[in-house]
Image (tube, coloured by chain):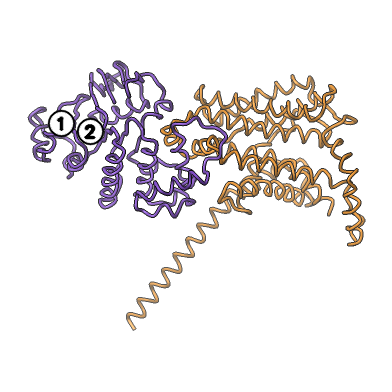
Chain colours: A orange, B purple
Amino acid sequence: MFNAIFGSFEAGAIYALMALGVYLSFRILDFPDMTVDGSFVTGASIAAVLIVGGMNPFLATIAAILAGFIAGCVTGLLHTKGKINPLLSGILMMIALYSINLRIMGKSNVPLLQEETIFTKLTNFWQSLKIDDAINGLMQMLGMGDSVPKTWGILVVMLLLAYIVKKGLDFFLKTDIGLAIRATGDNETMIRSFSADTDMLKIVGLGLSNAVVAFSGALVAQYSGFSDVGMGIGMIVIGLASVIIGEAVFGAKKIVRATLAVIGGSILYRLIVTMALRVDFLETGDMKLITAIIVIFALILPKINSSRKEKQRKKKRMTQSLDKEQAIKA
Amino acid sequence: MLHLNQIFKVFNEGTPDEKIALHELTLQLNPGDFVTVIGSNGAGKSTLMNIISGKMITDLGTVYIDGKNVTSVQEHNRARLVGRVFQDPMAGTAPTMTIEENLAIAYSRIKTRGLRIGVTKKRRDYFKTKLESLHLGLENRLEAKVGLLSGGERQALSLLMATFTDPKILLLDEHTAALDPSRAELITNLTREIVQKNKLTTLMVTHNMQQALDLGNKLIMMDKGQVIFKANEADKKQLTVEKLLEEFQRIRGEKMNSDRAVLI
């Protein structure tokens, strides 16, 4: 049980970056960007191929981020200059990237076993800090000695990384350009009348969003030890699930709060899926179905809730006015 | 300051719906002019605004702002010179952003936007003093989301934002039409105050004839894509709503067809 929860936290933290990218396009730019399914794999495959080719894993990851940025910019170009509907331009790019990803990898799957990745490097460094021994020792004292995880390093580093990206995003969205990007998603007529080139802002916004997604893809490939052409399927829905669950549970009044909520949402999503998969009749293959159902629930529940509250309010008012009438009669 | 030369704009050219929106319209605004524009529906007032702001590009003719030929300059580049307030109070502000964030966007209109923080302490103080001039108490609600403000408050904020960086031309497109009478009066007074204080060259479209007479130093009447009547400063002082309607009938020989136009 503990291991399952620990695994969810670890995966949630890694995929949190992807969710932050989706947050940027979906919430800030109001652009449901399907490119994510493709750019996630692009990030993964570029990192994998370069690492196998002997490149330093940190540099390989940076290359993956750049590739994601370019992919997002192309989607932005299709939408703004080509005047293609947002959803369709994302879908077109996603399909195009599928072939491009195959070309990058040369085959459908690149294994990274035995290769030096960011995680092997970080784990080495982490082990030299001896923190694992301390935490695990503490857990043994608490009587949880059977379920100590192999290392806490990945979780800590990933949470830290997600936090840094969150902070960066928070800062960016407060700058003059960031404010203009937010206004573009909010009221395009208005921001154009304040001398902002909305086409450019959308292109840059989508570029950044997909850069973060590709970053996440590169990390996932290194974490799980392979890059696969199918690993991005449904990624956008997982991202949306994280954003929506996070906002519903942790609130989204301010940007700083919302970005933190997205990270929390990503972890929560993994927990929900892990719990769901422990039910006997569900299989691993049902994960996408579970994800879709989670998103549907997360989208519908708040509306049902608010309409129920509205009904309760009306009922209350009705009884109050009836009471008044009776009081007057009496 | 603004010079429109022989502007011609046609919609749906070559189809049965062809409509000439502006027919060789020529208009000249001197620095500090405040011109009110009236006319029935379909007279071409909105097209005129869109041509000046760059939202539409003219088919023929040239647009000069501040001596520069901006005929084919894109909308967002032209927006450095032109401030706009729209009829819809929702149109001029970003609802999910705070008052201070909206003001920061307006503030950076004439700058190249970069990676500097939008709302700094220095800017916030400046925003506060500017908001105080609206007398709505908005200076105490800097971190409130604009979507929570009332229509009148949003329009007042839009007006402030549009005039924040002293645009060369201020375009007001029926900006009080969607408000209730008391709010409309508030915005009208604010408009007068702000335009006078900053000596802004202004073009205001309105359906309210009384407002067209009360505000500004010049008045033009449009019909069928042309300016059919002009009143300069001296003439305008003598005008009344009745005289305007008579004038229109004399020129066009028909009763003004818009029922909104006779609203006082």
Residue tagged 1? B232
Q: Can residue A306 be seen at all in this image of the molecule?
A: yes
The mark tally for this picture is: 2
* B86 lies left or right of A176: left
Q: Is residue B56 above or below residue A219?
A: above
Q: Amino acid at mark 1?
A: Asn
Residue A162's spot in the image, x, y percent? 71, 42
Q: Is residue B239 above or below residue A6?
A: above
Pick the residue in front: B177 or A280: B177
Q: Chain of mark 1?
A: B
Do marks 2 and 1 share a chain? yes
Q: Which residue is mark 2?
A: B35
- Chain designation of label 2: B
How packed mark 1 is, by other alpha carbons closer than 10 Å (few <14, some 14-19, many 20 or more), is few
- Secondary structure of the residue carrying tag 1 is loop
Image side of residue A21 versus residue A194, left or right: right
Q: How far apart are the alpha carbons under marks 2 and 1?
A: 9 Å
Quadrant of the drawing holding the C terminus of chain A:
bottom left
What residue is at 30 percent from the left and 29 percent from the top?
B49
Pick the front one: A135 or A39:
A135
Residue A105, image x, y percentages: 78, 22
Picture layout, residue A95 above or below residue B210? above
**For the residues bearing labels 2 and 1, Cβ distance under 8 angstroms:** no
Viewer-closest of A43 and B82:
B82
